[in-house]
Amino acid sequence: MANEQVRVPDLGDSGKVDVVEVLVTNGQAIAVDDPLITLESDKASMDVPSPLAGKVVEIKVKAGDQVGEGDVILLVEADEAAAEAPAEEEPSETATAQPGAEPEPASSEAPESTGPRRETPDEPAARPAALAPPDTGAVIEQAAHVKAYASPAVRRFARELGVDLSRVQGSGRKGRILKPDVQSWVKKTLAEPAAAAGAALPEMPVIDFSKFGEVERVPLTRVQKISGPNLRRAWLHVPHVTQHDEADITELEAFRQQHKGEAKAEGFNLTPLAFVLKASVAALQKFPKVNSSLDPDGESLVLKRYYHLGVAVDTEEGLVVPVVRDVDRKGVFELARELAEVSAQARERKLKPDQLRGASFTVSSLGGIGGTAFTPIVNAPEVAILGVSRATERPVWRDGEVTGRLILPVSLSYDHRVVDGALAVRFTTYLCQVLSDLRRLVL
Ligand code: CAO
């Protein structure tokens, strides 16, 4: 039996229009009125229904093509019983997307089964082609998506949002998917980002602690409410590893003690932290990957040629991270003065939003308090953070004798997607060399 050509029907005065979806596949059995392709002009979209029953032999168009009235869409090996059916039919006479479907009662979209497949003018005028659909975590399973029972308007809406219709439960008659169903699915998915990524977290149990003893409920501070979700996000997104190391800062400390008085006279404290910032920049310049961020496209790294360092400050309200800018261009005195200023501003809640933005790397120093090592959380999208613990006097075997040295523990947490272990330990090794011998800063 000869194959029948199915052509684009009369489109009114639309001229050439885009094929946005091909709804059938080669070899597929089709019934009269089954939707074959979805066409879209800048004003409307429409499905072209099959004028005959049979088997699809060859598809002549693909998504992205432009077609006009009379262009061949596909070849169909017509069923014998249907062979005498007219080869073409006006789209306005056709039924809805699913065989056997009944007209949809009034809903948020125009009913389709009773009239032309043109959409109502309240549809968005055009697809914002430049806008990527939001990441709803959906991987569109094309075959199932095509089979989903939904109107062109709903298909277009779902396509714009990147929603796989096969995952959406329809609430219309016979399970037809309506626009509100797509909206609810997106809302639900956005509320459960971890679940959408296939990494749902088990719920924490809700426990009434007062059953076990006296308790007091203290509200979280504003800072805690903001920093908590940020820390959690970084913890969940970043595969963390921490590299611990030790720097001999005996000479650095002697130098600091020599100049401490000068700083005091100018009204600020010269602590080891200013030296750590300077040494960190030297290491970042030597290992630029550590001063980078992953591009959100997942394809490249953004290497930063600036050295703005976030410094974690402990305040009564919680952890705040002001940014010291252009550390590479500042001397140790200037840095120490600025550290004193920004930490005072942080504690007095006087920091401006601009002072909290733009860091390329962060240092968190607990050395004034104590500790031997810790694993700070990377301040993503930065890729590394340096933790500093308390320097202690230690007996060290050196030049054939035991001698007392001041040892500073450092801990570099890093994003393992960007920094590998070898790079991390090269970074801390170099950092410790600079801290042990500040002359390296001028090399
Ligand atoms: N080892 C030994 N002594 C240290 C030291 C170290 N690593 N770091 C600082 N000190 C000394 C200082 O020299 C100073 O002593 P002197 O006055 O005798 O010189 C004393 O400890 C106090 O220093 P400081 O803490 O006031 O100053 P700083 O420059 O070291 O730190 C700041 C400033 C703002 C970072 C710090 O006050 C702070 O808030 N640290 C906490 C950061 C934090 O909470 N991080 C955790 C993040 S994760 O939850």
Image: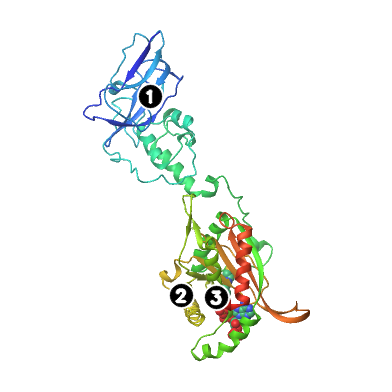
Marks 1 and 2, Cα distance to the nearest angstrom? 65 Å
Residue displayed at 59% across by 50% down: 201
Residue 249: % across, % down: 64, 78
Mark 3 or mark 1: name the one nearer the start of the chain.
1
Q: Quadrant of the C terminus?
A: bottom right
Against 201, residue 267 (above or below) is below
Say left or right for 373 vs 80: right
CB contact under 8 Å: marks 3 and 2:
no
Mark 3 or mark 2: name the one nearer the start of the chain.
2
Marks 3 and 1, Cα distance to the nearest angstrom? 70 Å
The secondary element bearing badge 3 is classed as helix
Query: Closer to the camera, 270 or 184?
Result: 270
Against 400, residue 258 (above or below) is below
Q: Disc number at residue 36?
A: 1
Q: Quadrant of ligand 1?
A: bottom right
The secondary element bearing badge 1 is classed as strand
Q: Disc number at residue 441?
A: 3
Residue 219 visible in the current orientation:
no
Residue displayed at 52% across by 70% down: 281
Q: Give the residue pinned by disc 2.
A: 329
Q: Amino acid at mark 3?
A: Leu
Label 2 crowd bin: few (<14), some (14–19), many (20+), radius 10 Å: few
Asked whether mark 3 lies closer than 8 Å to ligand 1, one says no
Query: Closer to the camera, 324 or 117?
Result: 324
Task: For marks 3 and 1, give the one nearer the viewer.
Answer: 3
Say left or right for 78 vs 246: left
Which residue of the protein is positioned furthest toward the left in this rendering?
A: 13
Residue 76: % across, % down: 39, 16
Residue displayed at 41% across by 27% down: 23
Residue displayed at 37% across by 15% down: 52
Residue 258: % across, % down: 59, 89
